[in-house]
């Protein structure tokens, strides 16, 4: 069920943004922590609330592709094609920044990231803000730096209730992982962060091959090794290794939280011993359903008080790129054995 956001709530949110305060709002990917992109004090407040290092750039959310020239000094054909095909939607474009775009939102780089989100509440907010003279809303995911991104309003309140003027509740996010980021500022478009819009769809839209993906680009904060991480050590394992690893851990008396396919959980269930402390969560079979519930499931597994989280690797087919990327980052803080 989508919670209703009233016109009064929306007007209050716009007033708060105009006043330099922070407003959390739903997008189709994850919840964003919003500030007026032209207001230096508001942007500083945003970085402080997130605990984010100042050289990590943020995404400017806009009401329509028509507003791209406010933020980008060049809008290449690739950007036009991608915006026409995927906006509003879970795609972020990195472009050469227009003059007057603050260093604070670009991390001092010559480029700026821009996205027009599809969630109806995000669009209503962006349009109402635009009418009130706010040309863009910078919004990182509404979590503390390095933590799991929020996909419900309750997740946002758990971490950031004290820093925000308002949390607009638009229900659970339909996509569930962050937007695909495509850099169109250079010679050849390239994917900086995979997401549910796949590289194949982007290449097909452009009718051309993409440049080398550089997911390790240091300025993409989502590319830091320990991003999107639960506090419990998380291991990502091939199907073959998963059951044996769970059994070995259970045998030492540790509690184990597992996210795996129904088939793998069935195999595991056959050999459970008395007193084994296992939290088993079934992984959805399609990438869309998997992505939608991934962060809520990671939170559930993290809250289980188990010593370890084990995740069975999903299929390596193209539709799973973004999910595998997030799972790798969640697991990269390697636990000592
Ligand atoms: O789906 C999303 O993109 C969500 C929703 C709220 O829109 N936002 C989000 O923001 O994931 P954040 O701040 O958590 O991640 C933004 C990513 C970071 O990895 C950042 O480094 C990258 O965008 N980024 C921003 N500006 C950039 C630029 N000029 N060049 C390269 N990467 C950039
Ligand atoms: Mg984030």
Image: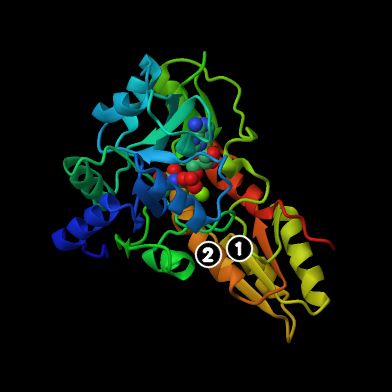
Mark sitting earlier along the chain (1/2)? 1
Q: Which mark is residue 196?
A: none
Of 65 and 107, which appears nearest the observer?
107
Q: Nearer the viewer, mark 1 or mark 2?
A: 2
Of 82 and 100, which appears nearest the observer?
100
Left/right placement of residue 260 relative to residue 149 reads: right
User: Residue 132 at x, y = what percent?
Assistant: 18, 44
Residue at image mark 2: 297
Rendered image quadrant of residue 61:
top left
User: Residue 246 at x, y = what percent?
Assistant: 74, 67
- From where the camera sits, is residue 284 visible? no
Q: Residues within 10 Å of mark 2 (few under 14, many from 20)?
A: some
Rendered image quadrant of residue 321:
top right
What residue is shown at x 68% (from left), y 54% (from top)?
Answer: 331
**Disc 2 Cβ-to-ligand 2 distance below 8 Å:** no
Check the image and report above or below for 61 versus 250.
above
- From where the camera sits, is residue 131 visible? yes
Residue at image mark 1: 259
- In the orientation shown, which residue stands out farthest toward the front? 41
Left/right placement of residue 32 relative to residue 247 reads: left
What residue is shown at x 54% (from left), y 60% (from top)?
Answer: 283
In which quadrant of the rendered image does the N terminus lie? Answer: bottom left
User: Residue 4 at x, y = what percent?
Assistant: 21, 63
Q: Residues within 10 Å of mark 1 (few under 14, many from 20)?
A: many
């Amino acid at each position: 069920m989508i919670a209703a956001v009233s016109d009064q709530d929306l007007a209050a949110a716009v007033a708060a943004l105009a006043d330099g305060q922070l407003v959390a709002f739903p997008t189709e990917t994850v919840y964003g922590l919003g500030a007026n992109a032209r207001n230096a004090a508001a942007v500083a407040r945003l970085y402080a609330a997130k605990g984010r290092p100042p050289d990590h750039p943020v995404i400017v959310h806009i009401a329509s592709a028509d507003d791209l020239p406010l933020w980008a000094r060049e809008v290449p054909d690739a950007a036009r094609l991608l915006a026409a095909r995927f906006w509003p939607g879970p795609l972020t474009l990195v472009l050469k920044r227009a003059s007057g775009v603050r260093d604070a939102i670009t991390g001092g780089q010559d480029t700026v990231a821009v996205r027009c989100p599809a969630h109806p509440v995000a669009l209503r907010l962006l349009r109402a803000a635009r009418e009130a003279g706010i040309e863009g809303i910078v919004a990182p995911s509404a979590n503390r730096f390095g933590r799991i991104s929020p996909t419900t309003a309750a997740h946002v309140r758990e971490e950031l209730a004290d820093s925000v003027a308002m949390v607009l509740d638009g229900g659970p996010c339909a996509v569930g992982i962050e937007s695909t980021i495509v850099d169109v500022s250079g010679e050849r478009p390239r994917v900086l962060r995979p997401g549910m819009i796949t590289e194949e769809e982007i290449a097909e839209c452009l009718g051309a091959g993409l440049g080398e993906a550089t997911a390790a680009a240091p300025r993409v904060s989502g590319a830091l090794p320990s991003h999107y991480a639960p506090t419990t050590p998380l291991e990502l394992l091939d199907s073959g290794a998963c059951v044996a690893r769970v059994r070995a851990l259970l045998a030492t008396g540790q509690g184990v939280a597992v996210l795996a396919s129904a088939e793998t959980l069935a195999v595991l269930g056959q050999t459970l011993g008395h007193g084994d402390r296992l939290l088993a969560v079934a992984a959805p079979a399609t990438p869309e359903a998997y992505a939608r519930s991934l962060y809520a499931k990671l939170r559930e597994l993290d809250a289980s008080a188990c010593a370890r989280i084990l995740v069975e690797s999903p299929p390596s087919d193209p539709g799973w790129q973004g999910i595998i990327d997030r799972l790798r980052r969640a697991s990269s803080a390697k636990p000592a054995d």
